[in-house]
């Protein structure tokens, strides 16, 4: 039953998430999807297809699942999106949003909450929002706390041997907010920063014993992302990248 999960953990993945939809058969309204991540096989007494369970059992299981899970999140696609995309693509959209929302689920982990509380008390300009609570803190603190939330459950996206989005996205979010950048400027910096991380990671060879590739090459992607949004000159960008060495 757990072969796929066991294979993924053998490759070094600590948390495995499952995702499923509800609402595809309804005549009207949105379609929802739920994603749940566990640290290991978690047998839950009474767990079954929700359609086969009475409401009181479903409600009890919902509480027990959230208590046992490392993270849980919900995503949805609206009725308008279903009309525009079709039910299949709208369902996949809801599933993707549920998985993306697991990054916010990481924000409720005790270590992330502790760091977020510290960031809110250090003062400084209110530039960028923390994803979980919405409080505004200096951009550097927002990037750090949001990156911690994105990787806390170890379910951030993986490209080959590196997790680029959990590095580049919080930086792009924080600096773009502080600079009041446009959506196009935000996406450009985020995409190019992610691309830089992936290309540098692909160039790494040999075993990574005692260190992780993201901690080494991620700084370059973060610096490039911030430099683009800060409109640095080529020389200033080179200096920022040089500080990553």
Image (cartoon, rainbow, N blue to C red):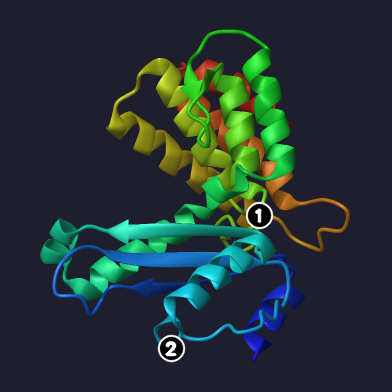
Task: Look at 82% across and 63% down and name the residue there.
Answer: 207
Q: Earlier in the sequence, mark 2 or mark 1?
A: 2
Q: Residue furthest bottom?
A: 1
Quadrant containing the C terminus in the rendered view: top right
Q: Secondary structure at mark 1?
A: loop
Q: Residue furthest front?
A: 56
Q: On the rendered structure, is 168 left or right of 106?
A: left
Quadrant containing the N terminus in the rendered view: bottom right
Which label was assigned to residue 89?
A: none
Numbered marks: total:
2
In the picture, residue 4 is in which quadrant? Answer: bottom right
Task: State whether residue 231 appears in this view.
Answer: no
Query: Relative to residue 57, is residue 221 depicted above or below?
Result: above
User: Could you say where residue 26 lies in the image, as x and y percent from the top left?
Assistant: 20, 75
Mark 2 vs 1: CB contact within 8 A? no
Q: Which residue is mark 2?
A: 52
User: Could you say where residue 169 lies in the image, as x and y percent from the top left?
Assistant: 50, 40
Task: Look at 66% across and 61% down and name the residue there.
Answer: 67
- In the image, 63 versus 72, the foreground residue is 63
Task: Look at 53% across and 46% down and name the residue there.
Answer: 104
In the picture, residue 36 is in which quadrant? Answer: bottom right
- In the image, 42 versus 185, the foreground residue is 42
Query: Relative to residue 45, is residue 227 depicted above or below?
Result: above
Q: On the rendered structure, is 67 left or right of 188?
A: right
User: Could you say where residue 87 lies in the image, as x and y percent from the top left?
Assistant: 20, 73
User: Could you say where residue 136 lies in the image, as x and y percent from the top left?
Assistant: 50, 20
Query: How many other residues sit within 10 Å of disc 1, few (<14), some (14-19) or many (≥20)?
Result: many
Task: Look at 34% across and 73% down and name the residue there.
Answer: 22
Q: Which residue is mark 1?
A: 153
- Calculate the distance from the C-alpha at mark 2 to the C-alpha at mark 1: 30 Å
Q: Secondary structure at mark 2?
A: helix
């Amino acid at each position: 039953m757990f072969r796929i999960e066991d294979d993924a953990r053998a490759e070094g993945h600590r948390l495995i998430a499952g995702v499923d939809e509800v609402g595809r058969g309804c005549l009207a309204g949105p379609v929802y999807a739920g994603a749940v991540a566990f640290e290991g096989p978690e047998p839950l007494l009474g767990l079954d297809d929700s359609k086969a369970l009475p409401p009181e059992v479903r409600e009890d299981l919902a509480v027990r699942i959230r208590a046992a899970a490392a993270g849980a999140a919900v995503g949805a696609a609206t009725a308008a999106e279903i009309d525009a995309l079709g039910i299949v693509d709208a369902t996949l959209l809801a599933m993707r949003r549920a998985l993306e929302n697991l990054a916010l689920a990481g924000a409720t982990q005790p270590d992330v909450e502790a760091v977020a509380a510290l960031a809110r008390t250090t003062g400084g300009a209110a530039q960028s929002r923390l994803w979980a609570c919405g409080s505004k803190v200096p951009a550097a603190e927002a990037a750090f706390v949001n990156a911690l939330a994105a990787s806390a459950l170890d379910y951030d996206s993986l490209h080959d041997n590196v997790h680029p989005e959990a590095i580049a996205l919080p930086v792009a979010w924080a600096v773009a907010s502080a600079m009041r950048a446009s959506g196009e400027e935000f996406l450009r910096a985020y995409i190019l920063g992610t691309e830089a991380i992936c290309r540098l990671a692909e160039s790494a060879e040999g075993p990574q014993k005692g260190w992780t590739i993201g901690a080494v090459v991620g700084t370059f992607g973060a610096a490039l992302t911030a430099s683009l949004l800060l409109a640095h000159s080529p020389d200033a960008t080179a200096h920022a990248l040089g500080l990553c060495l």
